[in-house]
Amino acid sequence: MFENLTNRLEGIFKQLRRHGKLSEKDVDDAMREVRLALLEADVNYGVVKDFINRVRERAIGHEVYRALNPAQQVIKIVNEELIATLGEPERLNLIGSRPRTIMLVGLQGSGKTTAAGKIAGLLRSQGERVMLVAADPYRPAAVRQLETLGERLNIPVFFEAQVPPPEMAAHAKDKAEKGGFTVIILDTAGRSQLDQALMDELQAIQKRITPVEVLLVVDAMTWQEAVNIAKGFRQVTPITGLVLTKMDGDARGGAAISIRSVTGVPIKFLGTGEALDALETYDPGRLSSRILGMGDVIGLIEKAELALDQETAQAQAERLMAGEFTLQDFADQLRQVRKMGPLGQILEMLPGGMGQMARQISPQDAEKQFKITEAIINSMTKLERHKPDILNASRRRRIAAGSGTQVQDVNRLIKQYRDAQRLFKTIKKSGKRGIPRLFG
């Protein structure tokens, strides 16, 4: 997410930090590069122009000249103005009589059906009783896809064959009310392009069920076209929020930066992957930090809290302090980290220098190394995992053969484990109580 733009901005800021005091020319040169970086990221021209003007106005004033670190002050201004461009965060409106209805709209292929499942899963985790409605009878695969998602999430899916979507939506709301459901989510039909028939149907559904939210699902990979799609829908239907999908595949980020300013519609969710939990509540401050290469520590902590077994992590920390941390514990830690999502997404959330180093590591290489490590440990016997001291040459050859790796790979893993052991023994001897765990 934002790889190209982040790398460009990091380079610009690095050059800026080489100056002591900043002249007006230094600021103008930096702003020219920032402007080009944003335009190459497919950010709307008008949005870029307003953003650069606001930053420059502040950056050539006393706010920067009186700062102890002028370059850092300019970066701070860029961050603040980027947050302002990204817009205020807004949460789902779940006020009113139950069941509250959320209606998802968008073009075909935008990821509406998957987004419906993700939002349903999120709301269910927050204590809501959710029903999904397959209001797209024109594409049989859409109904089946939603039913499959419902089965995976253990959330009921309502569908009536041969019933027009507006009438089906009304029936679904009536059933949800009688069944004690608190939220229903409608996955409406999409089209390959904006057309009058689609808009007429959406307006008819809205009149029958009066949704509290009408969320437009937009594929971020369409870049500038995503902004045009949002403007087109907003002209004929009261959109209350946006869901930007496929953000994990958008190396440029133009849609995320432009769409709020151009349409005036708040972004409410970001889809960051195919997994059903790969949905982020929109936070402009955290998004700006990631765009500018500052990481997203809060997002990383949230991922860890959702994915990691805190009791297991605590037990591992206690065994580690007692000198009992084993290769089995190491394998368990790796498995827990992998539950947090693709390694590439985890690495880009690291802040500062760590994030810059992480972006130099190929996520594919990191994932490959994880798999090699797991394969090696899985090829060990239970005794070997708990007592690595017994791993002589013949055992290491057997483990390498069983895991499809080389003896050198096994030796490297054992060395990493030994290094970690020595580190924690040093920490224990120094009397420190802070246990550095992988996450958690």
Image (cartoon, rainbow, N blue to C red):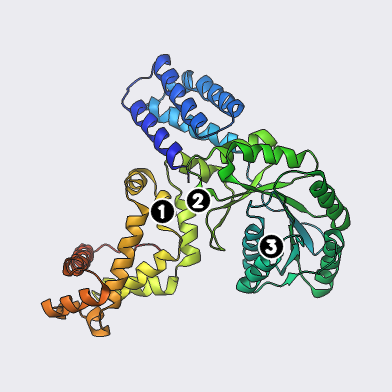
As measured in the structure, the alpha-carbon distance from the residue carrying label 3 to the one carrying label 1 is 30 Å
Specify the amino acid type for callout 3.
Ala
Q: Nearer the viewer, mark 3 or mark 1?
A: 3
Residue 169 makes an appearance in the image? yes
- Toward the viewer: 134 or 23? 134
Q: Position of residue 206 (x, y in %)?
A: 84, 53
Quadrant hosting residue 399: bottom left
- Toward the viewer: 355 or 19? 355
Q: Which mark is residue 248?
A: 2
Q: Which residue is mark 1?
A: 344
Specify the amino acid type for callout 2.
Asp
Disc 2 packing (10 Å; few <14; some 14–19; many ≥20): many
In the image, taking residue 422 as reference, residue 63 lies left or right, namely right
As measured in the structure, the alpha-carbon distance from the residue carrying label 2 to the one carrying label 1 is 9 Å
In the image, taking residue 78 as reference, residue 396 lies left or right, namely left
As measured in the structure, the alpha-carbon distance from the residue carrying label 3 to the one carrying label 2 is 23 Å
Q: Which quarter of the rendering shows the C terminus?
A: bottom left
Disc 3 packing (10 Å; few <14; some 14–19; many ≥20): many
- Toward the viewer: 303 or 151? 151
Disc 1 packing (10 Å; few <14; some 14–19; many ≥20): some
Whichever of callouts 2 and 1 sits on the residue coming sooner in the sequence is 2
Under circle 2, the secondary element is helix
Q: Is residue 351 above or below residue 170?
A: above
Residue 326 makes an appearance in the image? no
Disc 3 vs disc 2: Cβ atoms closer than 8 Å? no
Quadrant hosting residue 125: bottom right
Q: Nearer the viewer, mark 3 or mark 2?
A: 3
Under circle 3, the secondary element is helix
Q: Position of residue 411 (x, y in %)?
A: 17, 68
Specify the amino acid type for callout 1.
Gly
Disc 2 vs disc 1: Cβ atoms closer than 8 Å? yes
